[in-house]
Structure formats: C-alpha cells, structure tokens
Amino acid sequence: NSQAWGNDTKGVGLWYAMQGAKVGWIADEAYDPQILADIQRTARLGSENDVMGMVREFGHEGFADYIQQSGLQEAFINTLKMEPHYGGWMHGRTHGFLDVEGVAIAHDINHLTVLGWDQNQPFMNDTFDWPQWPALEVSDQTVINYYQGIVALGDPLGQNLEDL
C-alpha cells in the first residue's frame, strides 16, 4: 500500500483540501472538537449566517472576512456539509498509520469530522455509533496542529499556522 495507483493522487489531494478547509480555519486557542460537530450540523441544516458567526467566533482573525470578500462563502459552507471520510483514501494513504502521541494513529485523528448518527458528536466511528476511541486520548493542540499541517502542507505533528 506504499505506492499510489488509479486515482489515489487525485483522491488524496481532494481529501486533504476538504479536511483542511473543514478544520484548519479554527484558531488554536479556540479549538474544541465539538466546534466541528456544531458547525457541520449547522451548515447541513441551513443557516449561512449562523455558520459565519461561528467562523468569526472560533476562526483565525480575518478568515471570515476573507472568505466572504473572496466570494468563497458558499463553497466553504458546502465543504462543511460534506463527509470526506467515506472517500476511502484517508484510511491508508494520508498518514494512515502515523503514530500520534503513542496513543493513536493519524487514521483515528482523521475521524474528527465524522459525526455520530445523531450529528452531534465529533470523532465518531464511521460504521458503528461509538467514538473513535484512541482519538479521544490525543491532546487538542496536537489535533489542531495536525489539521493546520494539512492547510500549510507542513509537518502533520509540527506547529503550523502559529504566526497568524
């Protein structure tokens, strides 16, 4: 599984873009996994104003203004509605077995955007209605750095976007 085949490269690129867009906008000091469940559910149920209010509250300073002024609000909200986990590529192609704090692997962290069946809990399993248990043991700072690493195309376990 160490070599790309078929549409792997395109799939991994799409997955990275979607996951980075869904999570990387959150400011380090504001990060809480529940934000992802709340904003995805809000996007799926319909209120653009509520979504943008959450982006202003929890996002990097100026990010909400940037996406609005650049005409990207609809695309951003549509991305929040999507569930990229089910593309399949993330299981083995996107850091899949990278060790995270000795308690989880990157695959577990990738479950942040997988919501429970009731759309209220983050870090859920995609088959059964229970958490992706190892991910719950990883520090919030490591999780947000992992996703910001996607945005910055940087070290998935390093500090990324710290200077914003």
Image (cartoon, grey):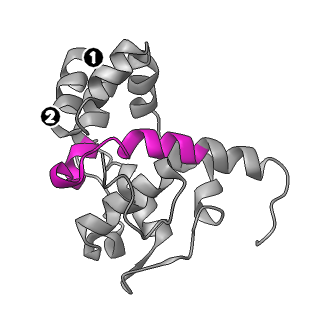
**50 in the magenta segment:** no
Identify the secondary structure beneath mark 1: helix
Q: Main secondary structure of the magenta part?
A: helix
> Which percent across, then down, holds residue 63?
30, 30
Residue 100 vs 83, above or below: the answer is below
> Which percent across, then down, holds residue 139?
25, 71
Residue at horizontal 47 percent and vertical 46 percent from the top: 19
In the picture, the quarter occupied by the C terminus is top left
Residue at horizontal 28 percent and vertical 41 percent from the top: 119
- Magenta segment: 15-37
The label shown at residue 48 is 1
Identify the secondary structure beneath mark 2: helix
Of the image marks 1 and 2, the number of the one nearer the N terminus? 1
Residue at horizontal 33 percent and vertical 63 percent from the top: 143
Residue at horizontal 32 percent and vertical 58 percent from the top: 144
Left or right of residue 161, residue 59 in this image: left
**35 in the magenta segment:** yes
Question: Dot 1: few (<14), some (14–19), or many (≥20) neighbours within 10 Å?
Answer: some
In this view, the residue in front, 149 or 16, is 149
> Which percent across, then down, holds residue 106?
48, 69
Q: Amino acid at mark 1?
A: Glu
Mark nearer the viewer, 1 or 2:
2
The label shown at residue 57 is 2
